[in-house]
Image (cartoon, rainbow, N blue to C red):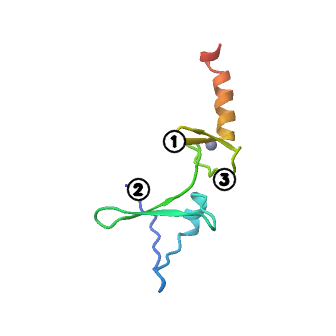
Amino acid sequence: MGKSTGVSRKIDELGRVVIPKEIRRDLELDDGDSVDFTVEPGGRIVIQKVGIYCAICGKKLKREGTYIKLGTKAMCVDCITTANAAYKTSEHNV
Ligand SMILES: [Zn+2]
């Protein structure tokens, strides 16, 4: 269970809720992105971002060719580069 952000929003007459700007920024949620709703026992509503994200740094992966898929996970070019450099300097490769 995550911690509350302490931010509350009212539902408008059309049933809309604005996701606070800070949360959208932190989670890299942009206009046009999709979110998935899960209703848990006890009435908790979980809103999850939908899309492909780097398993290491969490960055949103938008374009093919800027990441690789590893089974059900994905990894961005920056993390691949960092992992490669770390591996090359590690004892495993001496
Ligand atoms: Zn990454």
Question: In the figure, is residue 28 to the left or right of 45?
Answer: right
58 sits left or right of 62 in the view: left
| Residue 65 horizontal/vertical position (percent) | 71, 43
Residue 12, horizontal then vertical, whole percent = 48, 83
Residue 19 to residue 77: above or below: below
**How far apart in space, not on screen, are marks 3 and 2 (Cα)?**
26 Å
Residues at marks 2 and 1, CA–CA distance in whole angstroms: 23 Å
Quadrant of residue 82 within the rendered picture: top right
* Of the two numbered discs 3 and 2 in the rendering, the one whose residue sits closer to the viewer: 3
Helix, strand or loop for disc 2 = loop
Q: How many marks?
A: 3
> Label 3 is placed on what type of residue?
Lys
Task: Give the residue type that dot 2 points to.
Answer: Gly
- Residue found farthest to the bottom: 13
Residue under label 1: 72
Q: Which residue is mark 2?
A: 2
Sequence order check, earlier mark of 3 and 1:
3
Mark-to-mark CA distance, 3 and 1: 16 Å
Q: Which mark is residue 62?
A: 3
Type of residue at label 1? Thr
